[in-house]
Image (cartoon, rainbow, N blue to C red):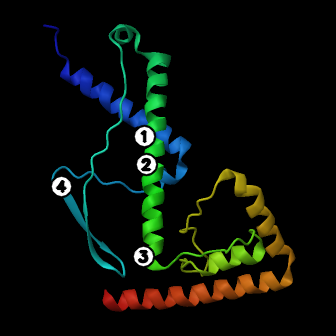
Amino acid sequence: MLPDFPELKQSVMQESSAKIRKLIHRDHPILAEIKTRTQHEGRSMRYEQVGYGEKQEDLTHHSFPIEVKFDEVPTLIGEKLDEKLEGLARVVGEHQMKMFIAKHEETTEMTGNRMDAGGRPMDGALLLDSIASMPADFDSHGNILPTSKWLTHPSMMATYRAAIQEIENDTTLKSRQRDIRDKQYSEWVDRENRRKLVE
């Protein structure tokens, strides 16, 4: 029987897991923004969703195949190991993104925070419509905080930049942007006052 090296195996597993997480976050930065919690036991979890009460979700099992041939083992270090981990990170990352987008769709459907552009192309007015549909947070000086995240395909970046530039150059759109910001600030003040009353 071959000897067992539990401490070495644990160390390799921890280092490999950390590297996989780093690769996933490199390829899918939005996943790096999501806080994670380790649940050591149980088959379901309960949590409070602000404004929608207590939620319960059953845990689901996810597995991903990784093949290591017997003759690969002696040389599975360095670049060869990195290549194997890259492949696994790619599969896991794609799966996590699909889960994230599905949850995002479910949440926006539930909250009604979804906007159908009806086939309109993205421009300054449509971008402001999107911004107006979202709540915003502010600091104590009234400066808007970057708490909202925008998820878009890289191919749309040039379109978004053009829409932002249109807002900057159009006095009507610029005035509407200020009105939206003032309304969001007023709503944030109301939320903070309600929160302080509860506390």
- Residue type of the residue flagged with mark 4: Arg
Q: Can you give x and y, in whole percent of width and height, for residue 16 in the image?
A: 37, 30
Pointer 1 residue:
92
As measured in the structure, the alpha-carbon distance from the residue carrying label 4 to the one carrying label 2 is 20 Å
- Distance of label 4 from label 1 (alpha carbons): 22 Å
Quick one: SS at disc 2? helix
Question: Residue at 22% across / 62% down in the picture?
Answer: 45
**Labels 4 & 2 near each other (Cβ < 8 A):** no
Residues under numbered marks 3 and 2 in contact, where contact means CB atoms less than 8 Å apart: no
Residue on which disc 3 sits: 110
Reply above or below: 50 against 72: below
Mark 3 → mark 2, Cα distance in angstroms: 21 Å
Q: Residues within 10 Å of mark 3 (few under 14, many from 20)?
A: few
Please give the label number shown on residue 96.
2
Could you tell me which quadrant the N terminus lies in? top left
- Please give the name of the residue rendered at 74% of the width and 68% of the height, measured from the top-left corner: 122
Q: Residues within 10 Å of mark 2 (few under 14, many from 20)?
A: some
Q: What's the residue type where badge 2 is placed?
A: Gln
Element assignment for label 4? loop
Instruction: Please provide percent x and percent y for residue 121.
Output: 75, 69
> Which of the two labelled residues, at mark 3 and mark 2, occupies the earlier sequence position?
2
**Residue to which mark 4 is pinned:** 43
Residue 158 position within the rendered picture, expressed as x and y whole percent measured from the top left: 77, 57
CA separation, marks 2 and 1? Answer: 6 Å
- Residue count near mark 4 (Cα–Cα under 10 Å), binned few <14, some 14–19, many ≥20: few
Q: Are marks 4 and 1 in contact (CB under 8 Å)?
A: no
Residue visible at 47% across and 39% down in the picture:
22
Say which amino acid is labelled 3.
Answer: Met
Instruction: Identify the residue at horizontal 36%, vertical 18% (top origin).
Output: 68
